[in-house]
Image (cartoon, helix red, strand yellow):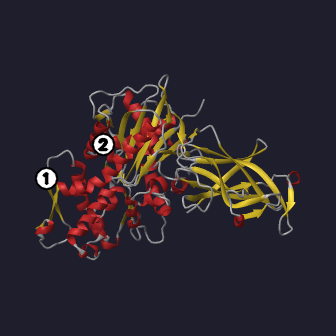
Amino acid sequence: MEREKLMVAVDFGTTYSGIAFCHSNQKELNDIEVVTSWSNNGVAPKVPTEIRYIPGRDPRWGAEASVACERRQTANSAIIYNRFKLLLDVRGGSGLYRDRTSGADDKIRLPAGKSPINTATDYLRLLYEELMEKILRRRIPETLDITPIHFIFTVPAIWGHQAQQATKMAAKLAGFCSRKSDTLSLVSEPEAAALYVLKAMHAANFSRISTQAMPALKTGDTFVVCDAGGGTVDLISYEVEEVQPSFKLREAAVGTGSKCGSSYIDQAFLELLRQKIGPEFDDEQIWNKKDIGRGSNLMKTFDLIKRSFGQTTNDVWFIELPVNVANDEENGIYDNELEFTAEELQGLFDPVVDRIVRLVQDQVQCINNTGKVVSAIFLVGGFGESHYLYQSLAEWANKYHISLPVINPRESWSAIMRGAIVRELHPAVRSRRLRQHYGFSCGLPYDPQKHKFKNTYMSPFGGRCVKNTIKWGGHLGDDCTETTDIVFPVHWTIDGSKTRIRCKLYASKAVHAPGYLTDLSVFSIGTIYTDISTVNFAELPCAYDEDGDLVYRFDTEVRMRLASADVSFSIWRNDKRIGNATITHET
């Protein structure tokens, strides 16, 4: 019998982070406890993903990073760092997911001398210490030290393997899994949300639905989950394969997403202020970052306005400015207050909301192209609680098909955390779709009808081959399960002194897989290293290369296995596993 564990989900978000937990023998949604009380951050369902470094003192994090009295004591040097999570994804917005909003990432500040992983580690270390010593130590004081913990970190589905690995590295450096009994895994955020949705449907736990009837998902039905957060928005679709005795799902289309979360509305608001104030707004001696950053009174006021948008009949709001500004009737500035109209607010919302609606529309169209019909759209995530976003999506759905419901579960802000635990306790996704092509470089046989002679070379083992060609083993849109491998036949030409070999794993998000490494859509995921110290070179074919050196041909299979948000590799020869392989990701 498997030992009971504590399941802890960590939603490390762009703007807010949260934690939920339950024991592995607990099965219901209500058994999952969401942390809502923090020692230095008050009572809140989540804490801001912010950190502030103070010379000679411990860093401040979460809500305490922007406490007014603390900030006054440390004057202008105490910069609040936020949104650094987005910088863990060095290829953010590439390929299918590129969009103009991603340009705001270059405005994200980092502390001097610290990388995105360093900054994320510092924040997560404080979160880990809070969890272990202030939360779990009080909840289970007698058994904490002997109870294994399985940590589940959620990551955006649009993130590549490098960003997934960076998240895992930051978490482990921060202390997660520092105890020998503890383990850690990753799960994609929309997949976690989908599992939460299934549980919520069973409990009829919904706050809003755009049609009169609640759909009862049955075998063959397809639904779309839109996970709208602060930094990223992920779309994923599932077909119901089985309902009884439990739900079983398969991905129905390639998931999509974009960096178009609610934080981009905040960025647009600051850009509007820049237009109204003029060049003075960029003078940090006057408009200090602490006065206009997240946690400032200015942004707190704007956040309240943003949350109410679509629910109130206000035509105008007044926002007190943190800096003395001369009256400017044309720009709506009177007595150091900014007159902020509903029309201006809608102008900030619409580019982001329109982008999300288009993502949903594209996902629904992908389903329709397969001959299936979408039964429901579920809107979750922190930004998913926005009434204006919900209304906009419901209006589009009604125009698209009058009976297509948009459903907003209760407490959708915690859907990812709760769903991550549900996913670990009740795995339901049988297969997923590859979000890109995967392949290795190789020398394909020369074909005069296809290739230029100048791009060829002679193989030591006979025949003329073409340089910089690539052989794909997995293709965009292919079905992939956690129990089946993507197989790549790979051969190396090596000398007899090698004990470790390496090769680069490449990917492309182009609709049609390109044939050459030089294609602009091809990028390197990382380098795979394999230990061959046990290989008997006497059994391998050998030949002399053009320099007269003896070389060997080593034929293998690289097998890749994908999980929700993780990847592993193994090396096989003659149908026998000869070891695992490790991957070092590009930075």
Kind of residue sitting beneath label 1: Asp
State which tag comes first along the sequence, 2 or 1: 1
Real-space Cα separation, disc 2 to disc 1, in angstroms: 22 Å
Residue 139 visible within the image:
no
**In the image, residue 302 above or below residue 11:** below
Label at residue 393: 2
Instruction: Answer left or right for 210 relative to 457.
Output: left
Q: Which residue is mark 1?
A: 315
Within 10 angstroms of label 1, few (less than 14), some, or many (20 or more) residues? few
Q: Amino acid at mark 2?
A: Leu
Q: Considering depth in this image, is 147 or 569 the residue closer to the camera?
A: 569
Residue 449 in the figure: left or right of residue 108: right
User: 328 or 370, which lies in front?
Assistant: 370
Q: Say whether residue 309 is left or right of residue 529.
A: left
259 sits to left or right of 473: left
Question: Where is residue 360 drawn, in percent x and y?
Answer: 37, 44
Is disc 2 placed on a helix, strand or loop? helix
Q: Position of residue 281 (x, y in %)?
A: 25, 72
Give the label, 2 or 1, closer to the camera: 2
- Position of residue 305 relative to residue 298, above or below, is above
What is the residue that sits farthest to the top in this orientation? 244
Element on which disc 1 rests: loop
Q: Quadrant of the N terminus?
A: top right
Q: Is residue 438 visible?
A: yes
Q: From this viewpoint, which residue is outermost toward the front?
A: 449
**Based on the displayed image, in which of its 4 quarters is residue 398 positioned?**
top left
The image's mark for residue 44 is none
On the image, the x and y values in percent for residue 433 come to 53, 42
* Pick the front one: 538 or 334: 538
In the rendered image, the quadrant that contains the C terminus is: bottom right
Identify the image quadrant of residue 369: top left
